[in-house]
Each structure stands twice: as C-alpha cells, then as structure tokens.
Image (tube, rainbow, N blue to C red):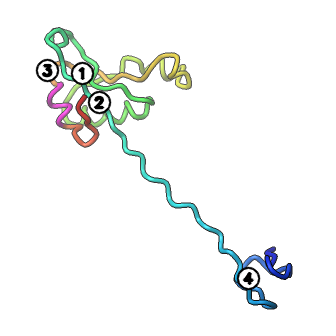
Amino acid sequence: MKRCPYCGAEYPDEAVICAIDHTPFEQPVEPPPPEPKVVEYRFRQLSAADSQQDFVTLVSCATLPAADLIVSRLEAAGIEAFIPDQSLMQVYGGALNAFGYVRVQIAPKDYDAATELLSDIYNAA
C-alpha cells in the first residue's frame, strides 16, 4: 500500500498519483545495473633462469574455475598447460587466502604464444 505524503490517504501499490490532492507518488528508483567486472591478469617477463625450468607460472588466478578457463583456452590452441594446485584447491577452495592463488603453468617455450593468445586479458607488468 502507498500513502500520500501530503494528505495521508492510502492507495494500492500501482497508483501513481493521489486522487484527492493530485500529489504524485515517488516512483521507486531502480539501481543502475552493475558494471561488468573486467578480468585482468599480469603476466611477468621471463628471466634467463626461468627459461631453464621445465614449467613456469603463466598467471595466478583468484579461483579454480578462472584457472580452468585459461587452461581450456590454452589447450584448445595446442599449448600444454596445467594447474599444479588443482587438487589442493578442490579440497580447500574456500581457503585461498591461506594458500595464495591458483597457478596456471606452461613450458617456457610456449610463454610468448600463450601471452599472445590471452592478449584480451593481458596487462604487462
């Protein structure tokens, strides 16, 4: 039920103006739609020592599903990738603050191709 702010008469919720004194009822203001969240990752440049490793961390994601999405994109392009923390995050997924973020790792030889492929979410460090 709506109540006229001037005379106090009550009206059904669909009423837009008071029939007695013609005071308009305030229309509920709808909140603006939320702005879409931009996912952005920072990929660091590989050092000479990193190039000698079997695998290097491409990116660290906040959640396991985000890391899975990146691995799927990489594998679809023929770049081998894996999540070394996957089992841990499946068991302790709610404790990211205790363990850090979920890492996506690839071979150093694929690093440039991977950053190029993921350039839509890439932000150079």
Q: Quadrant of the N terminus?
A: bottom right
The span shown in magenta is 111-116
Query: Magenta segment: does it hold 11?
Result: no
Q: Which residue is drawn at 17% across and 8% down?
A: 49
Task: Name which residue type carries label 3.
Answer: Lys
Task: Name which residue type carries label 1.
Answer: Ile
CA separation in Å, label 4 and label 3: 68 Å
Image coordinates for residue 44, horizontal then vertical, percent: 24, 24
Q: Which residue is drawn at 50% across and 22% down?
A: 96
Task: Name which residue type carries label 2.
Answer: Arg
N-term-proximal mark, 4 vs 2 = 4
* Element marked by disc 2: strand
Disc 3 marks which residue?
109
Name the mark on residue 42.
2
Q: Which residue is drawn at 50% across and 59% down?
A: 33
**Front in this rendered view, residue 108 or 46:** 46
Graded by Cα atoms within 10 Å as few (under 14), some (14 to 19) or many (20 or more), the crowding at tag 3 reads some
Image coordinates for residue 10, horizontal then vertical, percent: 85, 79
Q: Are marks 3 and 1 in contact (CB under 8 Å)?
A: no
Disc 4 marks which residue?
15
* Element marked by disc 4: loop
Q: Is residue 16 left or right of residue 41?
A: right
